Image (tube, grey):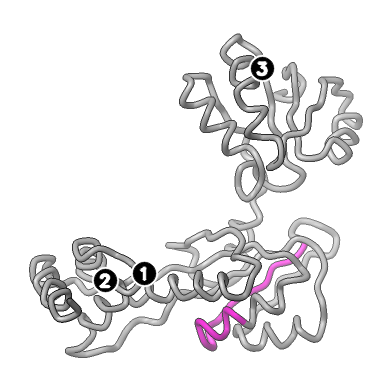
Amino acid sequence: MTLRGAELILCEDTRVTAPLLARHGISAPLQPLHDHNEAREVPRLVERLLGGARIALVSDAGTPLVSDPGYRLARAAIEAGAPVSAVPGPNAAVMALTLSGLPPQPFLFMGFLPPRAGARAEAIGRLRAAEAAGLAATLVFFEAPHRLAECLAALAEGFGSRPAAVARELTKRFEEVRRASLPDLAAHYAAQAPRGEIVVVVGPAPEATGGADEVEDRLRAALAAGQSLRDAAAMVATATGLPRRQVYARALELGREEG
């Protein structure tokens, strides 16, 4: 109904969307919208929306805006006061989470890790610092098949032998979910190159068992990750259940020591 009533349908690739519309007898004009032209096209599209035009946005697979084009347009339309709605559809991140066998909540969707090794290691290091400061969530990543083995190796180096899952080609003919430790998954996909759309799910950090030094270790990790004293104290207080004033006082002491 949404596509039949649209005056214009925006898509990532007309070669992908056109056959879908043809099968359903939908003849609305198609226009590509992707990372390379979205910033340029947004003002004109918002102007049309404000004029009453009905414009639909579809992605090649999954949910638009979730690691797909459309965020700039949606944000601009909302800021301009144009009506924006959504039709629920498949989401690989949530489906992989439900099939992983790992704790489903809370979870943190990270999109794609940086493709370069150094930047990827830094991103994983920031996550480890956040976990040291109290973050306890299942982590969900998208990854390209040709980078999966090195991504899993980097995750194994950063998080150790943590339980994880690799979900591939979800809802398609060759759907596969492989569950194992990060090192085992890294070894498997280093030997067998995968194909298709991939989601990596990593289990949450194990509960800390530290004693008297736990608060200080968490604070140092949060501060090293770039958190302010106030934010670091708030995160650690939430994670440990200690009074915020008490943790903030210790954070001040650490700040003076580091200074």
Q: Residue at x 53, y 72 (%)?
A: 102
Q: Is disc 2 in contact with disc 1, using a CB cutoff of under 8 Å? A: yes
Location of residue 106 in the rendering, given as x and y in whole percent from the top left corner: 43, 62
| Residue occupied by mark 1 | 135
**Amino acid identity at mark 2:** Ala
Say if the magenta span includes residue 165.
yes
- Which portion, as a residue range, is magenta? 154-169
Quadrant for the N terminus in the image: top right
Q: Which quadrant would residue 244 be assigned to in this image?
A: bottom left
Category of crowding for the residue at label 2, using alpha-carbon neighbours closer than 10 angstroms: few (below 14), some (14–19), many (at least 20): some
Inter-mark Cα distance, 3 to 1: 42 Å
Marked residue nearer the N-terminal end (3 or 1): 3
Category of crowding for the residue at label 3, using alpha-carbon neighbours closer than 10 angstroms: few (below 14), some (14–19), many (at least 20): some
Location of residue 11 in the rendering, given as x and y in whole percent from the top left corner: 76, 35
Marked residue nearer the N-terminal end (3 or 2): 3
Q: Residue at x 77, y 21 (%)?
A: 4
Q: Which quadrant would residue 252 be assigned to in this image?
A: bottom left
| Residue occupied by mark 3 | 54
Inter-mark Cα distance, 3 to 2: 47 Å
Q: Is residue 13 above or below residue 169?
A: above
Residue at disc 1, secondary structure: loop
| Residue occupied by mark 2 | 239
Q: Is residue 95 above or below residue 212?
A: above
Q: Residue at x 20, y 66 (%)?
A: 229
